[in-house]
Image (spheres, grey):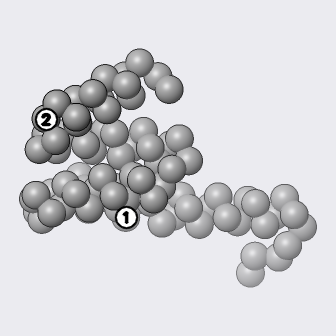
């Protein structure tokens, strides 16, 4: 895990209400292939601040990334995805 990610996780532990740290942590989790954990972070942010555009945007980006990963996996197995 990159040093910046470790710092963000530490930042979230020290200041769980700090939305920018949680948003960055969610992004790192998603890129690391952990979209369910990323979704949890985004939903925690929205529970604190339902108007968080960054959290809503992050949630919106999760589905396409997960769908693309699934499509690539199916393509690699020779399965039609139409």
Vertical relation: 19 (above or below) 79: above
What residue would you read off at disc 1?
60
Q: Residues within 10 Å of mark 1 (few under 14, many from 20)?
A: few
Q: Is residue 62 left or right of residue 15?
A: right
What residue would you read off at disc 2?
15
Q: Write down the quadrant of residue 79 in the picture.
A: bottom right
Report the residue at 31% width, 23% height from top.
Answer: 7
Report the residue at 76% width, 60% height from top.
Answer: 73
Q: Write down the quadrant of residue 15 in the picture.
A: top left
Tag 2 secondary structure? loop
Instruction: Give coordinates of residue 59: x percent, y percent.
Output: 35, 62
Q: Write down the quadrant of residue 22 in the picture.
A: top left
Q: Is residue 8 left or right of residue 35?
A: left
Instruction: Give coordinates of residue 48: x percent, y percent.
Output: 10, 58
Vertical relation: 13 (above or below) 62: above
Q: Is residue 81 left or right of residue 39?
A: right
In the displayed orientation, state which residue is furthest to the bottom. Answer: 82
């Amino acid at each position: 895990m990159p040093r910046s990610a470790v710092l963000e996780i530490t930042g979230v532990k020290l200041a769980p209400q700090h939305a920018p740290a949680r948003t960055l942590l969610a992004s790192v989790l998603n890129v690391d292939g952990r979209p369910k954990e990323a979704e949890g972070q985004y939903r925690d942010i929205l529970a604190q601040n339902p108007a968080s555009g960054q959290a809503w945007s992050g949630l919106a980006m999760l589905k396409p990334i997960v769908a693309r990963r699934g499509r690539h996996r199916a393509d690699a197995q020779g399965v039609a995805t139409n």
